[in-house]
């Protein structure tokens, strides 16, 4: 093999992707840099790459303008509760469709499959009216309720539970185990990878949601982070350094989590692709 | 194999997801279909008007405009995100030092929420003092008004959308590339095929399943595009970025036209169903499985 020329040739795509990678990252860098500038320097032409006189004033203003701990608490509690319920309900139904025999099984499963194709955007009007009837407008319960189940999750868990070997199940039945016990002691542990992937996807979709919170929440103290950030911008249209400080605060915990779970997160997005 | 009916157990396992599913998906879907035949302002009881809403919407200039805007958005977004995503996937398909980190970087915007992405780019594309125009000014170009100008607003919302989704497209295409057995490319190289020939005659044709999937997912997702546009322009200026979901939200929550908004939802649903139907139909014919 003539190694030197080969290496030379493969340099070009490497250079291209590295350069492009830096370009992809640059908006994040710019966000942080802007958040540390005073309002004169932030708008300066030519722009300064790094703040000449770094200041934390913008962060102080964010904390004055919105109740940051409260927003984090709202986002975290709604997300964690919804993710937990999605995982539990999906795993239970997935088990039933994969391992049990019952009447109308196929019909009921078709309902789940059909529901997978209904986007929130299509049912937003009746869903809002329903929440109004239930007196759940402007409440975290109303915010979370439509996210306690996921038809896609049921589909995903069914696929995983179908792969459990029959022998394990038969041995457990001979031992006199009930379905509940089989679910918790055999099925769930064996489906952990799928459950983790679903958990990550559910987390992303609830944490990042914007349209439903926008429609159902009005009070600042009940907002989630994305809604509060768009609100912060709406009330301070030209104070970009402060808005960038706000987005930085919201990005940092997610970016840190991503650093730790990078492989699993990418894998879970691929798992989501399987449904196609 | 043990065959026995276990109806009681099944009910117990299914009810926790089936009841919310009926309440928050099936019921609203049926309600949307019924409401689309009514006129309703939320204050007085709904009145049945048959196909009135649908007759109105085919002459509704704002709705048609929002439909065209959605198509323009997709037409701008899709080639950018596909070509860049494919380039990244091809470049990162082999391992080299830092390739894992680069994949990670490309994917970082994917997990960032649309609101943050939109705010970030709205600032970069701010006509006064934003990075883009300041940088253009340095090299002697007077930058456009970006999201404040009706000629540039669509471009201004397409750029961040492509930036955010590029990593996901890359990931899907990368998985597709890795499922192609390297023997095909190696055999072609031995037969004297050029790199370009290998790419266009072997790699890309074998990548059609992944490409097809990216296309369908992008179409379905972006007919529903809303978040980033609402944050950046709220459909403006002068309706130049008003998309279908924006029109639904405006009609229902701004004007209180619940029946009419439901009719618009049904049109959106129909479009998504048609794309899904085409996908199911054509998957077997177009896609080049080995």
Image (tube, coloured by chain):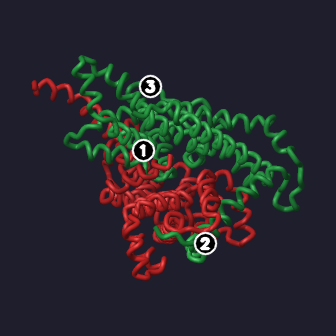
Q: Residues within 10 Å of mark 3 (few under 14, many from 20)?
A: few
Q: Can I make out residue B101 in this image?
A: yes
Q: Is residue B202 above or below residue A221?
A: above
Q: Which mark is residue B15?
A: 2
Quadrant of the image occupied by residue B176 = top left
Quadrant of the image occupied by residue A181 = bottom left
Q: Position of residue A127 (x, y in %)?
A: 69, 61
Spatial CA span between label 3 and label 1: 33 Å
Q: Which residue is mark 1?
A: B168
Q: Are circles 2 and 3 on residues that touch, CB within 8 Å?
A: no
Q: Is residue B104 above or below residue B214?
A: below
Spatial CA span between label 2 and label 3: 63 Å
Dot 3: element: loop
Dot 2: element: helix
- What hue represents chain A? red
Q: In the rendered structure, which disc, 3 or 1, sits on the residue that comes first in sequence?
A: 3
Q: Are circles 3 and 1 on residues that touch, CB within 8 Å?
A: no
Pointer 1 and pointer 2 on the same chain: yes
Spatial CA span between label 1 and label 2: 34 Å
Q: Position of residue A272 (x, y in %)?
A: 46, 52
Chain letter of the residue beneath label 2 in the structure image: B
Dot 1: element: helix
Q: Which residue is mark 3?
A: B141
Q: Disc count in the image?
A: 3
Closer to us: mark 2 or mark 3? 2
- The C terminus of chain B sits in image quarter: top left
Q: Position of residue A70 (x, y in %)?
A: 50, 71
Pointer 3 and pointer 1 on the same chain: yes
- What hue represents chain B? green
Q: Are circles 1 and 2 on residues that touch, CB within 8 Å?
A: no
């Amino acid at each position: 093999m003539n190694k030197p020329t080969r290496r030379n040739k493969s340099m070009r795509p490497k250079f291209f992707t590295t350069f492009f990678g830096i370009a992809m990252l640059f908006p994040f860098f710019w966000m942080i840099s802007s958040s540390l500038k005073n309002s004169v320097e932030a708008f300066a032409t030519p722009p300064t790459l790094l703040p000449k006189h770094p200041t934390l004033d913008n962060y102080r203003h964010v904390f004055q303008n919105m109740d940051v701990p409260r927003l984090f608490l709202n986002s975290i509690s709604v997300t964690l509760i919804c993710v937990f319920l999605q995982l539990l309900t999906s795993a239970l139904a997935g088990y039933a469709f994969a391992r049990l025999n019952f009447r109308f099984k196929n019909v009921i499963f078709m309902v789940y499959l059909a529901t997978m194709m209904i986007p929130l955007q299509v049912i937003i009007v009746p869903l809002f009216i329903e929440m109004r009837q239930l007196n759940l407008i402007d409440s975290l319960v109303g915010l979370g309720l439509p996210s306690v189940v996921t038809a896609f999750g049921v589909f995903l868990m069914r696929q995983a539970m179908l792969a459990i070997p029959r022998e394990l199940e038969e041995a457990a039945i001979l031992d006199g185990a009930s379905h509940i016990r089989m679910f918790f002691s055999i099925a769930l542990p064996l489906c952990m990878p799928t459950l983790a992937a679903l958990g990550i996807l559910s987390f992303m979709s609830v944490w990042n949601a914007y349209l439903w919170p926008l429609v159902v929440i009005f009070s600042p103290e009940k907002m989630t982070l994305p809604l509060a950030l768009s609100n912060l911008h709406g009330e301070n249209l030209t104070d970009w350094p402060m808005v960038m400080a706000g987005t930085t605060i919201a990005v940092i915990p997610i970016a840190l989590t991503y650093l730790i779970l990078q492989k699993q997160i990418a894998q879970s997005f691929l798992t989501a692709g399987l449904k196609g | 194999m043990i065959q026995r009916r276990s109806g009681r157990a099944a009910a117990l396992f299914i009810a926790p997801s089936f009841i919310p599913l009926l309440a928050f998906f099936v019921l609203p879907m049926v309600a949307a279909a019924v409401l689309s035949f009514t006129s309703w302002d939320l204050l007085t009881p709904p009145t049945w008007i048959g196909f009135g809403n649908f007759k109105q919407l085919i002459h509704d200039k704002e709705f048609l405009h929002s439909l065209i805007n959605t198509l323009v958005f997709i037409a701008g977004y899709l080639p950018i995100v596909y070509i860049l995503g494919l380039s990244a996937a091809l470049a990162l398909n082999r391992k080299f030092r830092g390739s894992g980190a680069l994949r990670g970087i490309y994917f970082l915007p994917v997990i960032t929420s649309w609101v943050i992405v939109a705010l970030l780019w709205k600032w970069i594309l701010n006509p006064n003092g934003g990075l883009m125009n300041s940088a253009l000014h340095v090299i002697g170009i007077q930058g456009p008004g970006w999201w404040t100008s009706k000629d540039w607003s669509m471009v201004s919302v397409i750029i961040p959308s492509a930036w955010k989704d590029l990593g996901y497209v890359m990931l899907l295409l990368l998985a597709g590339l890795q499922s192609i057995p390297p023997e095909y490319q190696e055999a072609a190289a031995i037969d004297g095929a050029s790199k370009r020939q290998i790419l266009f005659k072997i790699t890309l044709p074998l990548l059609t399943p992944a490409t097809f999937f990216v296309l369908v997912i992008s179409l379905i997702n972006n007919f529903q595009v809303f978040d980033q546009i609402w944050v950046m322009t709220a459909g403006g200026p002068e309706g130049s970025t008003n998309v279908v979901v924006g029109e639904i939200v405006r009609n229902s929550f701004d004007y209180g036209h619940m029946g009419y908004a439901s009719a618009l939802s049904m049109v959106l649903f129909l479009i998504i169903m048609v794309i899904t139907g085409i996908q199911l139909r054509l998957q077997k014919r177009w896609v080049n499985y080995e």
